[in-house]
Image (tube, rainbow, N blue to C red):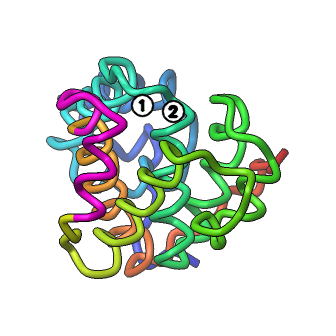
Amino acid sequence: MARVPYPTRDEYPAVYLAAYDRMLRERGETHFFLAFGNIPNLLDPLLSFTREMREGAVIEARLRELAIMTVALVTGASYEFNHHWNLALTAGVRREQLEQLADAETSDVFDERERAVVRYAREVTLSLKVSDETWSALRRHFSVRETMDVVIAVAWYNAVVRMLLPMEIEIEDWYKRG
C-alpha cells in the first residue's frame, strides 16, 4: 500500500479542480499522478512539463523510451518499468530489446545509437555523471537538441523513481502489460 493517499475529486480543493480533471483526461487514474495530487498547486505545472517533454521532443520516442526503461530497470522501479513497457512497444522498441535491456552492451538486438542512449541512462542513474567516452558516443549519434532530450528524460525519470520508490506507489489493478 502506498505511503500517501490518492486524493479523490471530492477531496480536492475547488481552486485546483481544473488541474485534477486535466490529470484524469490526460493520464487517467494513474497512482503516480494521483499521489502527486497531494501537492495540488504543482499538479497542473507537472502535467504541462511532462506533456512538453514528450510532445516537444525531437528525439525518436523509441529512443526516449529506451532511456526511461533503462532508468526503471537500473533502479528497480517496477511501477515505472511496467507502465513504460507498453509505451515503449508502441513507440517502436522491440519486445526482445526490452527483454535484453540489461545486456544492451553485448546484445545484437541493439544498434550503436540505441546502445549510446542506454549507456548514458545507465551511467547517469548509477553514478550521476558520465564518462567522456559515453558523452562522446551520445554526441556522435545525436544533435545537441536530441542529446538534451535524452538528458532531460533521464533526469526526469530518475526524479520520478526517487518519488515512486519511497512512497511505495503500487501498480494499478486495472493496468495490464502487453
Q: Quadrant of the N terminus?
A: bottom right
Q: Quadrant of residue 35?
A: bottom left
In the image, is residue 147 above or below residue 102? above
Q: Which percent across, then down, holds residue 82?
A: 67, 58
Q: In this figure, which residue is indicated by the disc labeled 1?
A: 23
Front position in the image: 106 or 152: 106
**For numbered disc 1, what is the local secondary structure?**
helix
State which region is magenta.
133-147
Is residue 167 within the magenta segment? no
Front position in the image: 154 or 44: 154
- Please report contact status of discs 2 and 1: CB closer than 8 Å, yes or no: yes
Q: Quadrant of residue 150?
A: top left
Q: Which percent across, then down, holds residue 80?
A: 55, 59
Q: In this figure, which residue is indicated by the disc labeled 2?
A: 27
Amino acid beneath label 2? Arg
Q: Residue at x 21, y 38 (%)?
A: 148
In the image, is residue 153 above or below residue 59? below
Tally of numbered tags: 2
In the drawing, what numbered circle is on residue 171? none
Q: Which percent across, then down, holds residue 163?
A: 34, 68
Amino acid beneath label 1? Met
Q: Is residue 44 left or right of residue 102?
A: left
The Cα–Cα distance between marks 2 and 1, rounded to whole angstroms, is 5 Å
Q: Residue at x 55, y 78 (%)?
A: 76
**For numbered disc 2, what is the local secondary structure?**
helix
Q: Which percent across, then down, holds residue 56?
A: 30, 18
Front position in the image: 60 or 28: 60
Q: Residue at x 47, y 52 (%)?
A: 68
